[in-house]
Amino acid sequence: MTPMRTALTPAALTLAILAGPALAQDGFRHAVEGGEVVIHPVDHASMVLETPSGVIHVDPVGGADLYADLPAPDLILITHEHGDHYDQPTLDALAAVPIIANPAVAGMLPAAMAERTTVMENGDRAQALEIAIEAVPAYNITEDRLNFHPQGRDNGYVLTIGDRRFLIAGDTEDTPELRALEDIHVAFLPMNLPYTMTVGQAAEAVTAFAPDFVYPYHHRDSDLEEFTRLVAEGGSGAQVVIAPWYDDAD
């Protein structure tokens, strides 16, 4: 089953970047049982997911203006505390809806917001908007990067929406837990240094857990053409989808 937007080849990357605003407005669509998931890239690691049972904002940062033309959230997911994933003024500007966050972020929230926050640690499972949610580990494994995302602190999330599993990896390297994931339909994988993965690490992870589709995100200045080539060489069959996470000013 393919999304309504087709995966882009390396030769089409420039066109994808130039066409970014139109693609972002329309969204990237994946059919699921009961409807579809529409993916709206916002910026860097922030996205909005329209699902059959509600709208999810993931790591909303950047201020209210970025979200003015997007559907309001029914749920907010936060992976960890860094400023490109957690921004209190942006949260204050969004609707007062349930939040799921890792313990570190939950401890930073204002009291009223904390009261509507479900705290999830690595390995925890929850249910929201009729969606099964699993918190998966997100951490660094390369020695000179360990201070950025220590093991056990930060989350990625696997969302089971209808009959499909969507991975929001958060800031992570190609950990054993990432490589061991199964039955992932769509994966959002980070790739930038020094904070997360090289494109080579990300491609090796794709080869290991073989999602149907992989969206590079959190990839500023990364070589997406090289990533696409390495994924194809890895033989997993995953389709790389290049989405417009950055505008021309970034």
Image (tube, grey):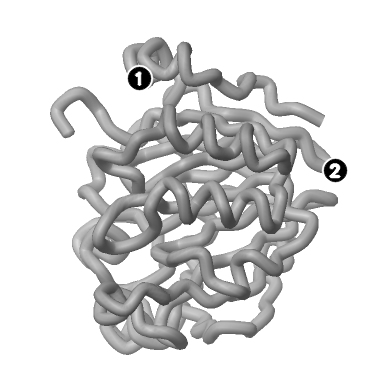
Mark 2 residue type: Glu
Near-viewer residue (27 or 238):
238
**Residue 173 visible, this orientation:** yes
Label ID, residue 33 = 2
Residues at marks 1 and 2, CA–CA distance in whole angstroms: 31 Å
Near-viewer residue (69 or 144):
144
Q: Is residue 68 left or right of residue 121?
A: left
Identify which residue is drawn at 58% across, 56% down. 205
Q: Is residue 10 left or right of residue 220?
A: right
Residue occupied by mark 1: 17
Image quadrant in which the N terminus is located: top right
Q: Position of residue 125 (x, y in %)?
A: 68, 79
Q: Position of residue 209 (x, y in %)?
A: 70, 57
**Residue 46 visible, this orientation:** no
Kindly report which numbered mark, 1 or 2, lies closer to the viewer in this rendering. 1
Residue reaching furthest front?
Answer: 233
Q: Secondary structure at mark 1?
A: helix
Q: Position of residue 59 (x, y in %)?
A: 38, 58
Q: Secondary structure at mark 2?
A: loop
User: From the viewer's perspective, is residue 41 above or below residue 203?
Assistant: above
User: From the viewer's perspective, is residue 205 above or below residue 8?
Assistant: below
Of label 1 and label 2, which has the lower sequence position? 1
